[in-house]
Image: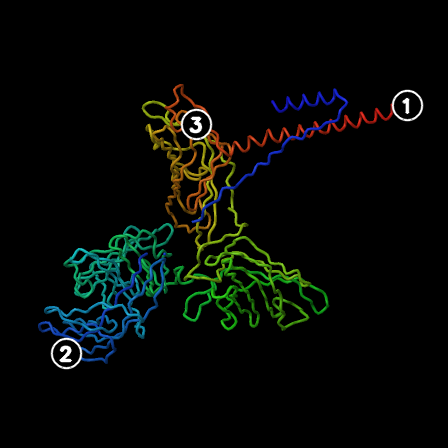
Amino acid sequence: MKLLTVILALLFLALASDGQSTEQPATRVGKTTQPTMPTQKPATVVPTTQPASKAHTEGKATVVPTTQQASKAHTEGKATVVPTTQPASTAHTQGNATVVPTTQPASTAHTQGNATVVPTTQPVSTAHTQGNATVVPTTVPTKAPATTFSPLRTWSVSDAHGNECILAQFYAAFSGTYKLKDKSTGKFAFNMPENAQVDKAKSRCGSATESAILALSWYQTADTFTLEFTMDPQTKMFQLKSANVSLTHTEAHFPNSSATGAVEYGGVPSEVFFKTELGYSYKCTAMEQIPFKEHAFAITFTDLRVQPFQVDKTFGKESHCPADFPAHWGLRDSKGSYCLLADFELTFTGEYMKKDKKMYPFEYVLPQNAAIDNATSQCGSDKEPEVNAILALTFDNGSSFTQVFQADNKTKTFSLVNATAVLVHSPAHFPDSSDAGKPVTYGGMVPKKFPTGLGSYYKCSAQEKVDFKTKDKFALSYTDVKIQPFDVKDTFGEMNQCSDDTPKRRPAVPPVGHFNISNTKGICMMMQFGAQFIISYQMGNHTKSREGYYFPNITVDTEASTCTDTKAEFVAKFSPEGKKTEKDWTMSLTFTMDKDKNYALTNFTLRYVVDAMYFPGVNASTHDDMTVSNGTKRYDSTAGNYYMCKANQNITAKEVVATFTEMKVQPFAQEVKKGGFGDPTDCAADNDVSNIVPIAVGCALAGLVIIVLIAYLIGRSRTNRSGYQSV
């Protein structure tokens, strides 16, 4: 108002005088910054290997310990024993854990009683004697011995009628820690013996109401390995419920152990494993590890195939684990490791000439069975400032598609720089073509596409078009892209998502809710706000998506909220947008008062459910409880005052971005003597907006004053000119 008064006074003075003067008001330019959104492998397990040693005698029993070299079949009594061999395996990385499964060469089998025992064998080292016991020291070889793969054992469980109800094949290795006699911690790692047998007394078929159990035992039943499975009759899926191992602490596997007898390991995994449709077999050729917190215990499977509950004489169709196929196309280097991963759907479009000399449009979809041309494809390297990685695909008897990715090791980024298609003009795709049967080249150089940091992968579900602007109007249309051509560590790295991948459905404008919380002293918390949540999640096909929901203004359960003199916690149970009658989501806002009577929001937590009802594209059987939180201090005010912010305020917690708007919160309402809200504490974002408004009004009025003054001066000038002319 003061500014307006000054302006009007100046206008009056200007009109009352014959002088010419103008006044330019200062213009303030506010700078608005957008808040940045922060972005977000178990211990190195090397299963130890056991050295070979010579056979020794204990009483009347001849014991053949582990051996390194294969031996010929031999006869003990009337039993002919044929030695078996264990497969070699490849060390791999799981997370930060390097897992090197033990490889076991052929060994000499022997007979104990009526049982034929095939002992496990390990790399060569020298056995030694402690008292009457032959001790086989553990060794970790620097290079796995060359061995041949032995056939996988198939374990089965049958019902009372002899019908098989569980089938399983796998190699397993156990690793973890144990207490030594000197109270320090030792590590163990060894393979499950080949001679493990099904314990029929402990195994069972299972049903919709009872779990299925495969129990294996060895060493005269002292050691056991039990896998328990459950099924969901509604979704018709099965999964692993628990994995328990009982291991006898022998000197061979647990040197100097403080324990005697058997020790229990394993339990219920913290994640879901082996989840598959009933009637199908879960298969994982790659190594899959189940970790447990206690004893740092882990079970590592290789060449796993398991099928409980519904079995029709043999394994059913295979449902592979994600590790078996990290990408639709995976290029490997000379060591057999992945160096380039790519998933995408692609359509070629353009025009071609028919025999009538006229141009006609074509559309050619890249077949999903396109194969990698290893002769043309190449892995990238990080040794040069700029280097290329090439993925060449061949398909349809002579057609090919080649993409060249360039890495800039100075900026640590990569991009697509060339895409060339050679399409054979077949009648199916190019009817009546003037180049019938001939390969025609399309495409070429590309202005850098898919820019992404090295070690990350580029993802875009939305369609991305590459137009080459040529006479034949050739273009590429990509969808569902996942590409990582450099720095691949077994699977895709961190995701770099394209800007076009927005949530499939943005939330409606969040309604503002009004919530009062009371304790024995009366109202202790008053909350007014609207909120929405944008949540990233993984769909059933292992691709990322996002979904948005708002916090309801009604049907909210706040009974779990609490108030004290120094801590106020607003806890709200709800179902987003009323999708369910069950309130299965929970949001909590924790405010803390310090000794100086200043308070702030000190923690935000959201517990939400990932299932097919809330998140389109997830498997129907998925029901995961997720909890995220952010403990950054924000929304400061003082006792007796309330925090107010009309502008949007974002809180990021892992996969969740929560946006609050129209906030008016008084978490310590008991500090207001007269009741109700106290004095407001405005947020900085609102102050920026409130300053812009008067500045804009002032500038507009100043502009109006200038226009009026100019018009007045022009009018005076014309009046004076006409007076001179009359004189």
Q: Position of residue 16 (x, y in %)?
A: 74, 20
What distance separates the C-alpha of mark 1 from that of mark 2?
A: 147 Å
- The residue to which callout 3 is attached is 642
What distance separates the C-alpha of mark 1 from that of mark 3?
A: 73 Å
Mark 1 or mark 3, earlier in chain: 3
Q: Position of residue 83 (x, y in %)?
A: 24, 76
Q: Is residue 483 left or right of residue 120?
A: right
Disc 3 packing (10 Å; few <14; some 14–19; many ≥20):
many
- The residue to which callout 2 is attached is 77
Mark 1 or mark 2, earlier in chain: 2
Q: Is residue 604 left or right of residue 447?
A: left
Q: Is residue 722 left or right of residue 286?
A: right
Disc 1 packing (10 Å; few <14; some 14–19; many ≥20):
few
State the image quarter where residue 348 is shown: bottom right
Q: Position of residue 249 (x, y in %)?
A: 17, 61
Find numbered disc 3 in the image and state the secondary structure of the residue it sits on.
strand
Viewer-closest of 277 and 474: 474
Assign the N terminus to one quadrant of the image.
top right
Does residue 582 appear in this view?
Answer: no
The amino acid pointed to by label 3 is: Tyr
**Nearer the observer, disc 1 or disc 3?**
1
- The residue to which callout 1 is attached is 726
Mark 2 or mark 3, earlier in chain: 2
